[in-house]
C-alpha cells in the first residue's frame, strides 16, 4: 500500500510543481535529504501535522497516505507522529476507521500523539458519542488505555501532554480546572530533569498567531490565561496547536501580520498549518507540517511539505534549552 501512495505522490509532486507557478511566491524550498540536521546527536525526532479532516473521500485518503509515505522515507527514524486535532471531519466512527486504516498501512513509528479538535467532537450523535469514537479508535490502534480526551505519553524519555475539550462549545475548547491541575502536575514531573516538554492542543492561546483578527473568538477559550500561566511556570515548554488553518508565516517577511511561531520566555507557541486544505494566508500549499529535532541543548523545528518532499527552508527555527 505504501507504493500505492508513493505512485500518487509522484503525480502530486508534478501537479504541485506546475500549480506553484501560479501561486504568489512564498519563500524558499530545499530538496535536501529527509534526515535530521545532526542524525548522530538527535535525541528525539518527530513529525507534527494538524487538521487532516478525514472522511470518506478518495482525495483525502490519497493525500494523507502520500504525506505519511514521505515520513516513512525519512533517513532519520521518526520516533512519533503528532496530529494536533481535527483528525476527522465530523468525529463519526467511519471517519476514524479511515484515519487509522491509512495510519496502519503506512506505519513508520509506534508512537502516536493525537489530539482531538472541534471537528472530532461534532458527531451527529453528540459529544459523548464523539468522545467514545475518538478514545475507542485511538486505544484500538495504539493499544493504549486512555479514557479522556486529555492524556500524556512518554517517548524516549520526553513527555507529551495532550489537552482536549470536555464538552462541545463550538470552535473553542472547554478545559476544566481538573484538567489544568492535571497538566500542572504532569509538567512539574516532566520538566524536573530539564528536558523540553510538548503540550499538544488543537486550539491556540488567545491573542496568538493572529487571533482574533484571523478568526475571531476561536482560541482555546476561557481557560487561556490560566493555561498559559501554568505552562509559564516551567522551562522549555512547547505548545503545539492547529485549528486556525493559517499557512506558515513569519510576519517580517510579507504582508501577513501573524507569526506561526511565537515565544514568551521559554514558552514556545507553535501553530501548525492545515494539512488537508490549501489556505488563503501565509504559505498556501496543503500537505505541510513541522519536523521537530530535539538535541541536548536545543530543539530545531523545520517546515516540510510532505506531498512534494521538500523542505520549506524559510520556516526553520532553533530554540535554545534552558
Ligand atoms: Fe480544522
Image (cartoon, rainbow, N blue to C red):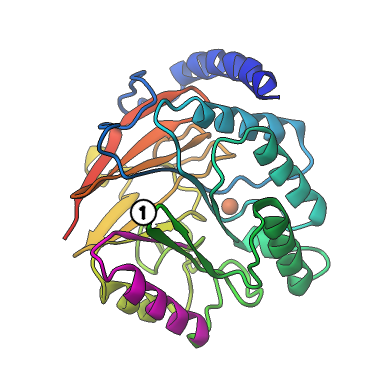
Is residue 209 shown left or right of residue 81?
A: left
- Asked which quadrant contains residue 148, the reply is bottom right
In the displayed image of the protein, which residue is found farthest to the bottom?
A: 177
Relative vertical location of residue 156 with respect to residue 171 in this rendering, above or below = above
The picture places residue 105, in percent across and down from the top left corner, at 69, 33
Query: Foreground: 214 or 221?
Result: 221
Specify the segment rendered in magenta. 178-200
Q: On screen, 151 above or below 307?
A: below
Mark 1 CB in 8 Å range of ligand 1? Answer: no
Q: Name the residue under label 1.
A: 270
Is 160 left or right of 238, judged from the image as shown?
right
Give the camera-side residue of 276 and 83: 83
Any magenta on residue 181?
yes
Say whether residue 258 is visible.
Answer: no
Q: Nearer the viewer, residue 166 or 158?
A: 158
- In the rendered image, which quarter contains the C terminus? bottom left
Report which quarter residue 157 is drawn in: bottom left
Helix, strand, or loop for circle 1? strand
Q: Residue drawn 53% across and 29% down?
A: 72
> Residue 169 placed where, x, y %?
63, 75
Q: Where is residue 317 shown, x and y percent of the image? A: 25, 43
Residue at x 35% of width, y 66% of height? 207
Asked if residue 278 lies in the magenta stretch, the reply is no
> Which quadrant: the N terminus?
top right
Across and down, in percent, residue 30 comes to 33, 21
Q: Residue at x 25, y 45 (%)?
A: 295
Q: How many labels does the image show?
A: 1
Amino acid at each position: 500500500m505504501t507504493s500505492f501512495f508513493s505512485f500518487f505522490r509522484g503525480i502530486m509532486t508534478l501537479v504541485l510543481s506546475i500549480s506553484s507557478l501560479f501561486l504568489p511566491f512564498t519563500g524558499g524550498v530545499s530538496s535536501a535529504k529527509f534526515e535530521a540536521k545532526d542524525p548522530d546527536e538527535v535525541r528525539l525526532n518527530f513529525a507534527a501535522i494538524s487538521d487532516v479532516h478525514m472522511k470518506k473521500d478518495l482525495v483525502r485518503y490519497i493525500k494523507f497516505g502520500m504525506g505519511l509515505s514521505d515520513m516513512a522515507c525519512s533517513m532519520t527514524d521518526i520516533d512519533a507522529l503528532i496530529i494536533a486535532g481535527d483528525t476527522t471531519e465530523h468525529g463519526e466512527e467511519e471517519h476514524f476507521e479511515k484515519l487509522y486504516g491509512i495510519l496502519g498501512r503506512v506505519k513508520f513509528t509506534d508512537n502516536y500523539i493525537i489530539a482531538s479538535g472541534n471537528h472530532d467532537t461534532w458527531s451527529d450523535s453528540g459529544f459523548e458519542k464523539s468522545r467514545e469514537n475518538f478514545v475507542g479508535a485511538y486505544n484500538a490502534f495504539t493499544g493504549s488505555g486512555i479514557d479522556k480526551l486529555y492524556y500524556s505519553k512518554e517517548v524516549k524519555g520526553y513527555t507529551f501532554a495532550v489537552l482536549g475539550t470536555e464538552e462541545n462549545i463550538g470552535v473553542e475548547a472547554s478545559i476544566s480546572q481538573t484538567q489544568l491541575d492535571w497538566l500542572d502536575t504532569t509538567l512539574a514531573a516532566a520538566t524536573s530533569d530539564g528536558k523540553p516538554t510538548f503540550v499538544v492542543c488543537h486550539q491556540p492561546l488567545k491573542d496568538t498567531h493572529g487571533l482574533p483578527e484571523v478568526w475571531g473568538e476561536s482560541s482555546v477559550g476561557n481557560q487561556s490565561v490560566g493555561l498559559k500561566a501554568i505552562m509559564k511556570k516551567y522551562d522549555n515548554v512547547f505548545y503545539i496547536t492547529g485549528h486556525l488553518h493559517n499557512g506558515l508565516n513569519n510576519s517580517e517577511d510579507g504582508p501577513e501580520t501573524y507569526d506561526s511561531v511565537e515565544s514568551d520566555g521559554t514558552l514556545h507557541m507553535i501553530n501548525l498549518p492545515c494539512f488537508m486544505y490549501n489556505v488563503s494566508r501565509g504559505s498556501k500549499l496543503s500537505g505541510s507540517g513541522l519536523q521537530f529535532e530535539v538535541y541536548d541543548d536545543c530543539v530545531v523545528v523545520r517546515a516540510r511539505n510532505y506531498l512534494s518532499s521538500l523542505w520549506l527552508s524559510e520556516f526553520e527555527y532553533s530554540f535554545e534549552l534552558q
